[in-house]
Image (cartoon, helix red, strand yellow):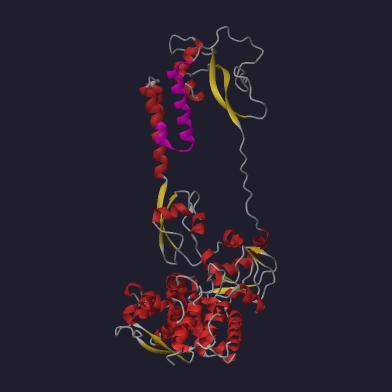
Amino acid sequence: MKIFLPILSLMLCLFQGKAQSGFLKNQENIFHESTSQFIAVKLLEADARAFQCNTWPQGWIYPTAGEYDLLGTKIKLNESDLAPFKSIYFPNGDCQRFLSLMSLCDLYFPLFRKQCEDQSLHTDFRYFPLILSGCNQSYRSVNNQSGLWAMDYLVARRQHLRIDSLIDERNGGDFSSKAAILYLKELNNRYQGDPLRTILAYYTGVPFVENIPAAVNGQDLIDGLNPDARAVITFYAYTKALIESARVGNHLNSYFDIQGQFDAIVPQQEIKKEALYAVLGSNKKAIAGMNPVYIGNTIPAGYRKVPFMLDKVESLKFEAMSDSVYRWAPPVMINEVKATEEVEEIIYYKVKKGDSLGKIAEKYHVTVKQIKKWNHLKSDRISKGKKLKIIRTKTVVVKDPAPKQNDRVEPEVETQSTTLPKPEVQPSVTNPLEEQIGKMEQQATACLKKKDYDCAIHQYEEIISLGGDKEVYEKKIAKARKDKKAISSADHKITYTVKSGDSLWSIARKYPGVTEQDIMKWNKCNENIKPGQKLIIHTKSSSKSK
């Protein structure tokens, strides 16, 4: 035997191919994603007591170093193996992750065991999906392996599973498990009942296993693998021992309770998922969580292998509003950008009874000083019937070549007819100070349109400091403050209780002017909300609480 040891060592080096890198780190990510998936969260909501670590006062029975049985093969685990495995299942000593994973095992293992028994395969294969996907139907790897069994595309197609832009049957339950077990049986037959080669061929690919010498088996085979490939086998053995050391409640019953909240529909026409969100107010996460097979943006008509699930309330809505759902189309967004330019407009205003220079200036968004200068007035007094020249800036859409610099747009309404003789005196050139005041007037007007009263008040105060008519602008400031107070007093803060099927989008729709981003900002939360959660909504007095 000693003569063959150097040869055996050389042979082992030959099959240490490139396995999937970072296995343990990847496993950490898989379990994190798995325990935050829709079904796991719903199981926690259905039976929160089963997820409390303090219900296990005697502590967990952790596997220790020694010999383990996996698929009828004896496998040795060292202390160096156990520490990282334990930290993956119990990060920072917390058992919440393990309890969540155990609830998923309780849900799926009876199905996996039955499929193994139907194909006369060792029932230890039922633990494999926990290693592959964390028992997550929606799992997808960077290599496009998908579903509970992390099936490769070509393998799934060879097993006659449908995979296209709308449907991925790898994410299903019964038929995807049957397809995976059939493939494992095929590999098991290929390697003459060698379970270690079968596992490695499924996980790392057949070419990797073909490089392992036929004479190497059992523990020698494991010891000759690279660290990542070896971790696949040893972590698998640890997982089996850990799960067998603990049991949780019957979460299959909890799952039936969850399913009782949903109804199946079979669309007669293709449906856009966005239509469900827009018309029925469906929750995106719930739709994805209950329908992992439906991977596209639309639900195909007549696909009956896996019924499409809707919340019971939404199912009733769909029954009543199916025509609206079928006909729904996304709103057309018109983003037409037009070229504009500013031109001067001359207006001849006829003074009416009760007019003042301040009133006229406010009407046309100019200053009193400008009106006096344009009309050579020595005082603020004006008489009824007098015609005043007003020059203001107007923004127009450019359709034809830009007008020449000195061209002016003639007045339309409330102006002197163009047949009247033009005044002999041409307007003087506005000095820089007056030009600055004019720009600040325009800025204040823009602020008022946006209901930014603080901005408008600031502009008016600046104008006064530059020598603008104090009486006129103090009145404008007073009006802006009054309008601001009226808006503020109309604000109301309400508390909204999240209901089943709610999403931030559907809640925001209940209150005009409120967006999803507003709700997340007011409540310092993200889009993942739960039934019963209290949300603060700032709305107007005209809005009604839903």
User: From the viewer's perspective, is residue 472 above or below residue 76?
Assistant: above
- Percent across and percent down for residue 260 are 53, 77
User: From the viewer's perspective, is residue 306 above or below residue 529?
Assistant: below
Pick the front one: 235 or 165:
235
Part of the protein shown in magenta: 430-457
Task: Determine the residue positioned at 42% across, 19% down.
Answer: 433
* Majority secondary structure of magenta residues: helix
Confirm whether the magenta stretch covers residue 508. Answer: no
Residue farthest along the front direction in this orientation? 3
Q: In the picture provided, is 1 more to the left or to the right than 350?
A: left
Q: In the picture provided, is 110 more to the left or to the right than 397?
A: left
Numbered disc total:
0
- Percent across and percent down for residue 330 are 63, 54
Task: Determine the residue positioned at 43% across, 10% down.
Answer: 379
Task: Determine the residue positioned at 60% across, 17% down.
Answer: 406
- Percent across and percent down for residue 277 are 57, 61
Q: In the picture provided, is 418 more to the left or to the right than 30?
A: right
- Percent across and percent down for residue 416 are 61, 16
Confirm whether the magenta stretch covers residue 455. Answer: yes
Can residue 530 be seen from the camera position used here? Answer: yes
Can residue 254 be seen from the camera position used here? Answer: no
Q: Where, by quadrant of the figure, is residue 245 drawn?
A: bottom left
Q: Where, by quadrant of the figure, is residue 184 drawn?
A: bottom right
Task: Determine the residue positioned at 35% across, 23% down.
Answer: 465
